[in-house]
Amino acid sequence: MTKATENHMDRVAQLPCIVCFYKMGIETRPVEVHHVSVPADDCAVAPLCVEHHRGATGVHGLQRRTR
């Protein structure tokens, strides 16, 4: 990982969860950095709280239930 990529990921990790913020108006932290593209691109990432990343209602939690 380059220094520029590492800086970008660190900046994204400082943001609130994008789902909590836009859907409920709350700034949930801490967040996990989620890659939004396949193959994973370190520039295409989004900040997600644990619930919206890996929880039952999260992107990875929903994938497990639909398989």
Image (spheres, helix red, strand yellow):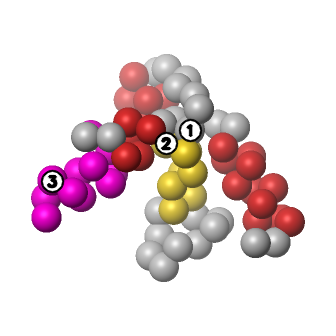
CA–CA distance between discs 3 and 2? 19 Å
The N terminus appears in which quarter of the rendering? bottom right
Specify the label residue 58 is tagged with: none
Marks 3 and 2, the one that precedes in the sequence? 2
Q: Is residue 30 left or right of residue 58?
A: right
Look at the image and tell me in which quarter the C terminus lies. bottom left
Residue 56 place in picture, x, y as percent: 25, 40
As drawn, the residue found furthest toward the bottom would be 39
| 25 in magenta | no
Instruction: Say which residue appears at 75% left-offset and 56% top-offset.
Output: 8
Residue extending furthest toward the left: 66
Q: Dot 1 surroundings within 10 Å: few (below 14), some, or many (20 or more)?
A: many
Give the residue number, with chain letter if any, for mark 1: 31
Secondary structure of residue under mark 1:
loop
* Separation of residues labelled 1 and 3 (CA atoms): 22 Å
Quarter of the image holding residue 22? top left
The Cα atoms of the two marked residues, 2 and 1, are separated by 5 Å
Give the x, y percent position of residue 55.
32, 40
Residue picked out by circle 3: 65
Marks 1 and 3, the one that precedes in the sequence: 1
Q: Dot 2: within a 10 Å radius of its alpha carbon, few (fewer than 14), some, or many (20 or more) residues?
A: many
| Residue 51 drawn at (x, y percent) | 38, 36
Q: Is residue 13 above or below residue 1?
A: above
Going 21% across and 57% down the picture, which residue do you hit? 64
- Tell me the amino acid under the disc marked 2: Leu
Question: Tag 3's secondary structure?
Answer: helix
Mark in front: 3 vs 2: 3
Q: Which residues are magenta?
A: 57-67
Q: Are marks 2 and 1 in contact (CB under 8 Å)?
A: yes
The kind of residue on which mark 3 rests is Arg
